[in-house]
Every structure is written in structure tokens, then in C-alpha cells.
Amino acid sequence: MKLLPDPERIRKASASAGDQGLGQGAEIAIGLLVFFGLGAGLDWWAGTTPLFMIAFTVFCAIGQFVRVWYGYETRMRNLEADRAHNAMAHQNNVSAGDETRGSRA
């Protein structure tokens, strides 16, 4: 019976979570800069000073928030399902990911 998790697995999971957060932050920042630039260019072309710049930036910020929110919800649902499956596997004396050993006929 193994009570403590594998340290290598924890290290990999924490590293990937940090990389994922850093990647999402970069995507948000680049997206905001692109939409800000598009709005500024459209404002310069149309002669309207801050109208499109503000509208495009707000549109991008709302879109990024919704994208991150739904991604988080999906990731949490998957983790909860994995946790429930592993708990049931533990109760049935099946190692995680091995569903053939727990079937008792």
C-alpha cells in the first residue's frame, strides 16, 4: 500500500502547471496588444481617436476571460472525474489505470 505520491510525478505536474500559467499569461498579453494595435490602426485610418482602440481592447479582454474560464472549468471537471475514478479504484483494490485487476467474478 502506497500512501505517499511519487515525487517525480509531483515535480512534473507542478512544472507543467507553472508552464501552462505562464503560457496563458503570454497569450492574454499578446492578444490584448494585437487588438489594441488593430484598434489604434483603425482609429488612425478612420480619424476617430480612442473609439476602436477601446472597443477592441475591451472585446479582447472579455473574450480572453471567457476562454480562460471555460478552460479552467473543463480542466477541473476532468481532474474531479480522475480523482473519483482513482478513489473507486483504490476501494476496489485496483491500481489507478488498471481496470482489469478489480473485477472479481
Image (spheres, rainbow, N blue to C red):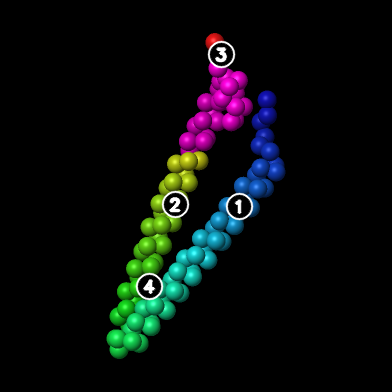
Q: In whole angstroms, how far apart are the C-alphas of marks 4 and 1? A: 29 Å
- Return the disc, 3 or 4, that comes first in the chain's sequence: 4
Label 3: few (<14), some (14–19) or many (≥20) C-alpha neighbours in 10 Å = few
Give the labeled residue for mark 2: 71
Q: In whole angstroms, how far apart are the C-alphas of marks 1 and 2? A: 15 Å
**Magenta stretch in the rendered image:** 80-104
Q: Secondary structure at mark 3?
A: loop
Q: 86 left or right of 51?
A: right
Image x and y of residue 69, in percent: 41, 54
- Return the disc, 1 or 2, that comes first in the chain's sequence: 1
Image x and y of residue 81, in percent: 48, 36
Which amino acid lies under the numbered mark 1 shown in the image of this protein?
A: Ser
Quadrant of res 41? bottom left
- Return the disc, 3 or 1, that comes first in the chain's sequence: 1
Residue 30: say if magenta.
no
Q: Secondary structure at mark 1?
A: helix
Give the labeled residue for mark 1: 16
Q: In whole angstroms, how far apart are the C-alphas of marks 3 and 2? A: 38 Å
Q: In whole angstroms, how far apart are the C-alphas of marks 3 and 1? A: 37 Å
Q: Is residue 104 above or below residue 81?
A: above
Whether residue 49 is visible here, answered yes or no, is no
